[in-house]
Every structure is written in C-alpha cells, then in structure tokens.
Amino acid sequence: MSGDSAASGSGRSGDRPERPVGRTPQGRTSGRLRWGRPREGGLLQGGVQGSPVIRLFMRWVRRPLLPVMRLWRRNIQLKVVVTTLLMSLGVVLLLGFVVIGQVRNGLLDAKVKASQSQATGGFAVAKQKADEAASGTGEDTSTVDGRSSQSVIQWMSDLVESLSSGGQGAFDVVTLPMGDESGGGRGPRASGHVDPAESVPGNLRDRIDIGTGAAQRYTRIVYSNGADSQPGLVIGKQVNDPNGDPYQLYYLFPLTQEEKSLSLVKGTLATAGLFVVVLLGAIAWLVVRQVVTPVRMAAGIAERLSAGRLQERMKVTGEDDIARLGEAFNKMAQNLQLKINQLEDLSRMQRRFVSDVSHELRTPLTTVRMAAEVIHEAREDFDPVTARSAELLADQIDRFESLLSDLLEISRFDAGAAALEAEPVDLRIVVRRVVSGAEPLAERKGTQIKVVGDQQPVVAEVDARRVERVLRNLVVNAVEHGDGKDVVVKLAAAGGAVAIAVRDYGVGLKPGEATRVFSRFWRADPARARTTGGTGLGLSIALEDARLHGGWLQAWGEPGGGSQFRLTLPRTADEPLRGSPIPLEPRDSRRNRGLDEAGAPHGGGDGENRATLPAPPAGTEGAARAARDPLGPLSAAVTPTADPTALPG
C-alpha cells in the first residue's frame, strides 16, 4: 500500500493511482532459465552429468524422493487427495486474491474520495485566508504605509496550525516553497511532527511546480520525533500567500486504519481458506476411500485367484454400483473356477489316457514285434511282394514303438514327473556322439556334417541323456530337410551360458513357422503323409528338455535359405540366462548378406522371417524369467564372443 500514484483533484479527470512495479519479464525469463536446468538434468531419473561430486550429491538428494515417487505411482487414493488439495488450494488462493483486491480497492477508493474532498476544502480555505490577508480584512492585520504589516512567516505558521486543527489527527498539513526557494517566509512547515522532506515524494513536488491543479501520490509518512512511519496518501496543490507568491500546500492522510482493515480481511480469508482446503481434503479422502477400498479388495482377490486360490470371493454389501461390481466379480471367479476345474479334469483324463494306452500297447506291441521279426527273418523264402510287406511291417513296428516312447515321455512332462539329473559334461563329447550316430543317414542323403567351435572345452551342468536327445532331433531333422547340402553344428560359450546351433541350407521355414515347429504333431506341409521322418513329437520333447534345464530352444528360418535351431543352456544349474553366445539369425542369411554388402551393421534388427522364442507356459519358471528380463544383455563379465543380437525374441 506504499506505492506511488497520481490523480487530479476532486471533480477533475486525471491519472489513475500508479501500481508498484514488479519484476521485469527479463528477470522472470532468466529465473526460468536458471532454475530450469536441474529439472532438465533428470534429478529423479539420475541423469545428471558432471563431476562425480555433483552426481553423488544428486544421488543423495534423489534417494529420499524415491519412496515418495513409488508411493505416488502406486496409491490412487493419495493421487486423488493431493490433486483435490492442490486444486482447492488454487481456487482458494485465486478467490482470496480477488476478494482482497476488491476490498483493497474499495477501501482505497473511499479513502481517496474522502481525502480529495477534505483537501479541496482546505485548499479553498487557504486561498480565502490569503485573499482576506491581502485585502486587510484578516483578524490579525494592520496597515502601515498602505502595505500589509502581517509577517508572512507568522501567517504561514498560523495557516498550518489552523488547517491541521480541524483534522483531529485524521490528516496533517505541510507547506513547502516553490522549487529551491526558502526565503521570504517560504521555508517548510508541517504539523504533527511530520518530516516534509521525507514524507512528500520528489516527483510530486516537481508535478506541483509545473502545474496549477491538484495531484496526489501514495507515500510513507515519516515523523521527525522518532515515531514509526506509516503508509499514507498525500494530496498537494499550488496556492498563493497574501503577497501573491506561490507556495505548495499538502494534505497527508494516514492509511493506518485501512491497512488494519485489510490485514483483518487477509487473516480471515487465510483462516477460512485453510479450513476449507483441509475440509475438502478430508472429504476427498473419505469419498475416495469408499471407492478405492473395494477396488483394492478386488485386486488382492484377483492376485490370489491368479496364484491358484480359486475359492476366494469378494465381500458384497449394499446394492450400489460397487456392490454390483463385486457380484459380477464373484460370478466371474465362480465361472472361472468351474472352467478351470473342468479343464484340469479333462487334461488329467487325457494324460491318464495317453499314459494308460502307451503302457497297455507295449504288451501287444512286444508280441507283434516278435512275430514280425520271425516273418522278417524268413522273408527270403517269400515271393517278392510278401517279402516287401514283411520289410514294411518291421519298419512300421519300429515307428510305432518310437511313437509310444515319445508319448510316454510327453505324458511324464505333462504330469510334472520329469526329473533332471545334471552333472558337469563336456558338450563336445555329446555332439560327437550325435554326429557319429547321424552319419549313416547323412551318407544316404549325400550330406556332410561339420562341427565348428570344438577346439576348446564347452562344459556345463546338464543332463547328458536329454541334451543328446535334443541334439539328435535337431541334427536328424537338419539332414532330412537339408536337400543334400552341408549341415553345420556350432558350439560356443560365453559368460554363464553355452549354446549349440544346428544350421542347414535346405527348404527353410516360412514366416511364422519358426514358432510352430515346436507344436505337437505339427508339419510344414499338412498334405504330406506321415510315412517318413519322425513321430512329430521330437521337437516338442526337445523344447521340454530345454525348459527343464532352464534354457532356450529357438528356431530361425527363411524360405529357400535353410534354417537354424539354437539350444542355449546355463553353465550351472538354476542360473538364469541373460543372453546366448551364438546369434539366432546366422551371419550368412540373406538379410545379413545384404547388410554386409551395404556396409551396415547387422544382427540387431527383426527381419521378416526371423524366428521368435516360443513362449513358455504361463506360471512356469521360464515364464517368470522371461517376464523379469526378456531382453536382458549379457553381464559385464561376458567375453566378446557373446553376440548381443543373440538375445531371445
């Protein structure tokens, strides 16, 4: 309330009171730039760059904020309550500013009007007294040689005392000479111990010097007796003394009462606003609690349902929307439990049926095999057609026996009865056994099997029997579908992982087939009769063996460009995998050859025909590992032989 303003006298148009000047836009801009940089540096994300001391300080500042941010992200009730408090606080502040502004303007306008009226009357009285003194009709005048004998100094003092006596402390009167003149009785005079030089602004004096109208300013009234200064309104005008010489006459009106009234209004609004904000926060907390509590209950029950506790239900009270939601949730859980129980019973029956049929067929199969062997040994005594039938009978019995063995193995995996017998094994020995066993088939197909990367030991804790079965499936499939071209078996180890890749250059895989080759009884060409090849369960069993080790079995292929199957296993049992030493897509694929010709880095993108990792079943350990780190890179201790493009998926 101590700003400056200028206005004309009562009844005249003039300037409005001037407001205090705030900070310049340049100052605000520089402030935003100055304080904006720490936010851009990522205080909460730890992205501050600079010296280690600065990073350590930012980490120390960020540490206590992390629990708050975690709570903010996870608690919807806190979000709603804090948002309500902030919005209500903003509304209360805005309303308070508007009300205080209106009250302030109203108090000041009333004070200005009353002050202007009082000052106008005082100016008229001063002019009247000067005219009376000049005409010789004043109370204390006498005539000597036709000239006024009244002392101008005494007259000025009497004028100040006379004008201020009518205010009774409501205002003070000050007279000042024009410009720098101080002689002839024109020295400064004031009532009520007012300091004229400090109380009357210089710009107001300059305005009175050059104009004849009244002017006003807000100021601080300073007292010469040591009293505290106070805000006030000063109204001045240029008038003449009895000798006709101009001087400046000022009325100073204290604004103490208005300031007290405004402070009272501010205190009342602050108290009421704080009470309203707290009340709104409490109301928001109670209202949100009524909605959030059932939602939290439903979330907890959903988590327990997902954990297998299908008997969990929500407690429903009332008939409102939340109650209907609870009833619908309970019905959904009941139907879900019923369906899951039905599926479990059906799956149990199917597994039992497969297991029972496999076991029951072994006895007649043994009898049939014995009879078939007798017939097969005596085929030379038969005619050619009968002899050929005996050979076909022996082959199909072998195939039937292999199918029964695979069905029994699948039933063990489905029942969860498969056990891992892991021990440290040099995988080169397993690979050499598999290659030696597949060489007769490779010779018939005109294929040569090459082993790469067997110069150094590749040791891992694995079940040698299961790994050998996986590799046998992969190598035999590669030879059968390789179109007589070479098959490459590659071994590598890096960090905590070992990998074996089987690469062929045959018909390859079409887009989307790389994830379906592990399905049971799946064939790339459904129209082809299953008279050659395996039982259709080999890759399914191989995938289960890989998962039992905590490893990956993945496939890649391109039409006409061959395929590659990669088995990745942890070096030690129960060690999570984070990468593979061998890239899933080989470097001699069409896409990588094109990138090499273009001079671009390869190995990281997802090609159209690139295979993806077969998704582990929900609820298994493999699925949990994939959810924790589906694209995790190799650790820092991994040697450079680990290719970052060999990540799952």
Image (cartoon, rainbow, N blue to C red):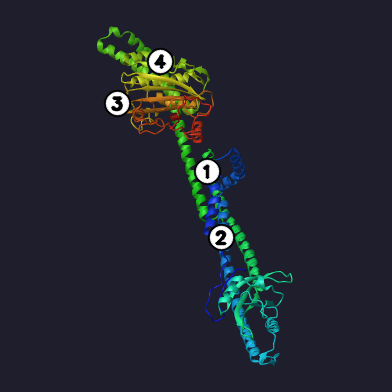
- Nearest to the eye among marks 1 and 2: give it: 2
**How would you rate the neighbour count of disc 4 (Cα within 10 Å): few for under 14, some for 14-19, many for 20 or more?**
many
- Indicate which label's residue lies in the foreground, 1 or 4: 4
Q: Name the residue under label 3.
A: 528
Residue 360 percent location from the top left of the image: 43, 21
Q: Residues at badges 3 and 1 in contact (C-beta under 8 Å)?
A: no
Mark 2, residue position: 23
In the rendered image, the residue lying farthest to the top is 381
Q: Is residue 389 visible?
A: yes
Q: What residue type is disc 1 on?
A: Ala
Taking depth in this image into account, of 522 and 217 the one nearest to the observer is 217
Give the CA separation, mark 1 to mark 4.
51 Å
Q: In this view, does 616 lie above or below 47?
A: above
What's the CA distance linking mark 3 and mark 4?
28 Å
Residue at numbered disc 4: 435
Query: Decide: marks 4, 2 in contact (CB < 8 A)?
Result: no
